Image: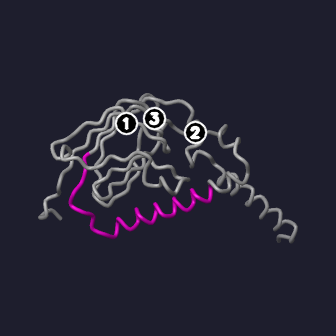
Amino acid sequence: MFTMKKKIFLLFIVHIFLLGCANNPVLLGISELEWTSYSPEKQKSLLASYNQAAKERKKIIKEQGNQKLGNEFLEVTVFDGKVMFPPSFINWQNYKPVKFTIFEGQCSDIAIEHQSDNDSKTKLGVCFYDNVLYLDPIYYDLTKKNGTTTIHFSPLWLTGFTYKGISSSGYVRMNNVTIEIKQREESPNKT
């Protein structure tokens, strides 16, 4: 049987554990060194923004599962250049090229693997709205929650176009990457 003192102690331990999880700078894409340089008020503000952005992103992704997306989609390949991996977020690293499909009106998190360490992974956030491809959001800045790099529609997408030297300032901080985009349209008869 727990006494009141034991209950309070257990609640305190749970609270400390939860605070430790909530203060994880890896969720934000911030190095431990940068995180510790922020005041407690700034950390609290960043976490509040992160929680709001994460909640909105989860809602968008959940709603996508319940609605029919547009029939236009992009085939995107990201290669060359470098990205940053958790938990350090200090040095750019090589990664395995990644190819994905994204439909108009969709947001997704694309897994990126380290080139030589299969256990080291990160996620590139992408959204495709109104013929704009958004890449690499900042999860604690609500003004950049869709992406820090935007690529607007070009008629060249219809036959495929390659963008070189693309960089971003979001979670993975792409540096000098190459992005190939080809726009397609799903057949209306396909179910």
The Cα–Cα distance between marks 3 and 1, rounded to whole angstroms, is 11 Å
Residue, x 27% and y 64% (percent of image)?
A: 69
Sequence-earlier tag: 2 or 1: 2
Callout 2: few (<14), some (14-19), or many (20+) C-alpha neighbours within 10 Å?
Answer: some
Quadrant of residue 87 within the rendered picture: top right
Q: Nearest the camera: 33 or 12?
A: 33
Instruction: Give the x, y percent position of residue 61.
Output: 40, 62
Q: Nearer the viewer, mark 2 or mark 1?
A: 1
| Residue range of the region highlighted in magenta in the rendering | 47-75
The Cα–Cα distance between marks 2 and 3, rounded to whole angstroms, is 13 Å
The Cα–Cα distance between marks 2 and 1, rounded to whole angstroms, is 23 Å
Q: Which residue is mark 1?
A: 166
- Position of 112 with respect to 90 (left or right) is left
Check the image and tell me how it is coloured. Answer: one colour
Q: Which residue is mark 2?
A: 87
Q: Nearer the viewer, mark 2 or mark 3?
A: 3
Under circle 3, the secondary element is: strand
- Position of 120 with respect to 81 (left or right) is right
